[in-house]
Image (cartoon, rainbow, N blue to C red):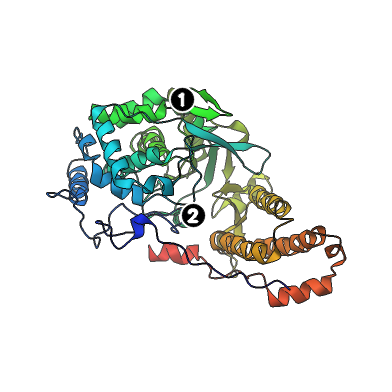
C-alpha cells in the first residue's frame, strides 16, 4: 500500500519576507471567482517614497468616481510608480508558466528593486513595449480549444497595476446585474440572484444567448472609445492600446492582434467588463427596459448572460434589436446556442395550454436550469450539472489519469482527492446531489481502471482489493452545501 504523501514546507520568497518594506497582503489566491477590491479598509497604508501613499490616492479616485458619475480622469498614468508596481508584483502567482522571455516570478524577484525601477523609468519615458503573449490552446471539452495568452512577468505587473487603478473607477459604474470577475462577486451569487428573479418576479420567458467568440472579436477602436467615457488620460489609453496591439507568439512566429483581448491576461477581464457594460448592461437598463410593456431583467457573468421577460412580445423585440446592437460593436450571437423559451412559475401550466409539452431548460454557468416542484407541489427552480459540462469534466479526468500511468500512486491519489473536492465545492448546490454522486462514482471506476493499466501486476487487481484500498484512502464525499436559496434570503 502506498505511503501517505508528506507535505514539504514551502520556502519563503522575497516578497513574503518580514524584511520587506511593504507589509504583505493577500492577493486573489484561493478566492475562487469572487475577488476583492485591491484595498480593504483594515489594510495598513504603504508609502515607499514619503508623502501620500498609493492606497490613499486610490481611495481618492473611488471617492471622486462616486461623487461624480460623469467625471473624467486625466492624470491616472502618474500613479504607475515604483510603489504601485511593487504592490502589483506581490499579487502575482508564483506557479504560473512564464511568457515568451522564459522569465519566472522567482527570476524577476532575484533583482526586484532594480527591475521595478527600470520598468518605472521606461513607462514614464514612453519606451516601454509589451512583449507578445505566448499562445496556448486549452481544451474546452467539446472537441474545441480556447486560446490562452500567457504574458511575461513584467507585462503582468503593469497590467495588474492598471487594473488596480481602473477598477476604482469602473466598480462604481458597473451595474449590479454584472458578476464576472468583479470584487466580492461570484458565480454562486449570480446563480442565487437569477433564482430569486425567476421565482419572485414576473418571469414567463427566458432568452438564453451566447456571444460567438467574444474575446476574439472585441473591437480595439470601440474599446478605446468606450474607455474614453471615463479615462481622458492619453498616456493611459496609449498604454492599454500597446497591450491590445502587442501581438501573439504562435509556434515561434509572431502574429499581429488587430482585434480581441487575450484570454488569460490580467487586464482582459476588466476590459471585457467595460466593453459589455456599455454595449449590453447599461443599454439594457437605460434604453431597452423603459421601452418594454412588461418587466425584464438581465444577469451577466463575463460574456455569458440570461435575459428574463414577462411578455413574449418584449422578448422577441429585444432579440431582434440585440443582433443589431452587437453588430455595431463587431459582435454576433451564436445562433445554435441562442434560444427563447417559456420558463418560470407558470411555465408548466402555460405549456400544457399551448400543447408544448414540458417546459424547456437552459444552461448558465455550468448548470442546467429546469422547472421543478417542491415537496408541497409548488414551483421550484432546480439545477443540476449541465450534461456538456459533466461530459467535459469526465473527459478531463480520463485524460489526467492517462498522463499519470508512471506516476506513483502516493502522488496521484491526493491530487484526485483535491480534484473531487474542487468539483464538489462549486457544484454542490441545491438539488444537484445525484450528479455529484455520479461524478464521484465515475472517478472511483476510473481510478480502478487506471490502477489496472499501470502494470501487468496491477492488471489483476480485483474489486475486493480496490475496495480495501479505498477503505484506507477514501475518496471524499460532497461537503458543505452552497445553499443558493438561503444566500438569496440573506441578501
Residue 99, given in percent of the width and then of the height, sits at 48, 38
The numbered dot on residue 82 is none
Q: Element under label 1?
A: loop
Q: Residues within 10 Å of mark 1 (few under 14, many from 20)?
A: some
Name which quarter of the figure residue 210 lies in: top right
Give the x, y percent position of residue 363: 58, 47
Residue 320 appearing in the image: no
Please identify the quadrant where the N terminus is shown: bottom right
Name the spot of residue 24 as percent of width and height, x first: 31, 59
Question: 427 and 131: which one is in front?
Answer: 131
C-alpha separation, residue under disc 1 versus residue under disc 2: 31 Å
| Element type at mark 2 | helix
Give the number of the disc on residue 191: 2
| 455 relative to 67 in the view: left or right | right
- Residue at 23 percent across and 41 percent down: it is 81
**Which corner quadrant of the image does residue 41 belong to?**
bottom left
Which disc is residue 259 wearing?
Answer: 1
Q: Is residue 47 left or right of residue 202?
A: left
Would residue 100 be found to the left or right of residue 76 on screen? right
In this rendering, which labeled residue sits more in front, label 1 or label 2?
1
Estimate how packed mark 2 is, as few (under 14), some (14 to 19) or many (20 or more) residues with alpha carbons within 10 Å. Answer: many
| Quadrant the C terminus occupies | bottom left
Front-most of 392 and 179?
392
Q: Give me the residue at 39% from left, 45% from top.
A: 108
Report the front residue among 37 and 226: 37
Residue 478: % across, % down = 60, 68
Q: Which residue is pictured at 76% across the width and 63% down the height? A: 445
Q: Earlier in the sequence, mark 1 or mark 2?
A: 2
Work out whether 490 lies above or below 187: below
For the question of whether residue 23 can be seen, the reply is yes
Amino acid at each position: 500500500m502506498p505511503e501517505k504523501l508528506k507535505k514539504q514546507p514551502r520556502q519563503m520568497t522575497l516578497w513574503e519576507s518580514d524584511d520587506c518594506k511593504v507589509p504583505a497582503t493577500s492577493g486573489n489566491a484561493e478566492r475562487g471567482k469572487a475577488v476583492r477590491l485591491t484595498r480593504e479598509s483594515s489594510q495598513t497604508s504603504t508609502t515607499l517614497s514619503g508623502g501620500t501613499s498609493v492606497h490613499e490616492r486610490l481611495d481618492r479616485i473611488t471617492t471622486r468616481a462616486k461623487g461624480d458619475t460623469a467625471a473624467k480622469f486625466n492624470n491616472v498614468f502618474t500613479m504607475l510608480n515604483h510603489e504601485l508596481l511593487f504592490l502589483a508584483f506581490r499579487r502575482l502567482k508564483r506557479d504560473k508558466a512564464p511568457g515568451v522571455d522564459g522569465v519566472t516570478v522567482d527570476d524577476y524577484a532575484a533583482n526586484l528593486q532594480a527591475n521595478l525601477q527600470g520598468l518605472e523609468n521606461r513607462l514614464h519615458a514612453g519606451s516601454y513595449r509589451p512583449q507578445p503573449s505566448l499562445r496556448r490552446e486549452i481544451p474546452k471539452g467539446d472537441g474545441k480549444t480556447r486560446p490562452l495568452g500567457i504574458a511575461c512577468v513584467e507585462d503582468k505587473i503593469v497590467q495588474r497595476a492598471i487594473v488596480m487603478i481602473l477598477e476604482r473607477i469602473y466598480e462604481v459604474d458597473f451595474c449590479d446585474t454584472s458578476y464576472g470577475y468583479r470584487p466580492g462577486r461570484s458565480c454562486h451569487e449570480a446563480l442565487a440572484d437569477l433564482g430569486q428573479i425567476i421565482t419572485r418576479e414576473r418571469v414567463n420567458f427566458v432568452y438564453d444567448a451566447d456571444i460567438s467568440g467574444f474575446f476574439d472579436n472585441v473591437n480595439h477602436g470601440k474599446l478605446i472609445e468606450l474607455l474614453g467615457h471615463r479615462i481622458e488620460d492619453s498616456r493611459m489609453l496609449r498604454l492599454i492600446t500597446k497591450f491590445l496591439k502587442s501581438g501573439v507568439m504562435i509556434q515561434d512566429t509572431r502574429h499581429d492582434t488587430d482585434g480581441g483581448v487575450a484570454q488569460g491576461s490580467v487586464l482582459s477581464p476588466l476590459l471585457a467588463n467595460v466593453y459589455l457594460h456599455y454595449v449590453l448592461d447599461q443599454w439594457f437598463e437605460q434604453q431597452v427596459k423603459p421601452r418594454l410593456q412588461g418587466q425584464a431583467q438581465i444577469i451577466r457573468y463575463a460574456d455569458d448572460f440570461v435575459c428574463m421577460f414577462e411578455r413574449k412580445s418584449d422578448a422577441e423585440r429585444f432579440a431582434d434589436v440585440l443582433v443589431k446592437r452587437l453588430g455595431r460593436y463587431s459582435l454576433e450571437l451564436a445562433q445554435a446556442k441562442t434560444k427563447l423559451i417559456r420558463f418560470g412559475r407558470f411555465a408548466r401550466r402555460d405549456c400544457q395550454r399551448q400543447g408544448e409539452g414540458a417546459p424547456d431548460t437552459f444552461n448558465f454557468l455550468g448548470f442546467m436550469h429546469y422547472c421543478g416542484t417542491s415537496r408541497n407541489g409548488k414551483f421550484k427552480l432546480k439545477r443540476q450539472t449541465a450534461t456538456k459540462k459533466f461530459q467535459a469534466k469526465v473527459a478531463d479526468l480520463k485524460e489526467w489519469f492517462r498522463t499519470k500511468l508512471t506516476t506513483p500512486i502516493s502522488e496521484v491519489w491526493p491530487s484526485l482527492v483535491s480534484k473531487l473536492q474542487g468539483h464538489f465545492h462549486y457544484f454542490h448546490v441545491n438539488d444537484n446531489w445525484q450528479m455529484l454522486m455520479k461524478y464521484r462514482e465515475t472517478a472511483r471506476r476510473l481510478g480502478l481502471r487506471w490502477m489496472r493499466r499501470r502494470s501487468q501486476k496491477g492488471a489483476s487487481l480485483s474489486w475486493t482489493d480496490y475496495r480495501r484500498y479505498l477503505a484506507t484512502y477514501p475518496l471524499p464525499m460532497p461537503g458543505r452545501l452552497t445553499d443558493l436559496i438561503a444566500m438569496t434570503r440573506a441578501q
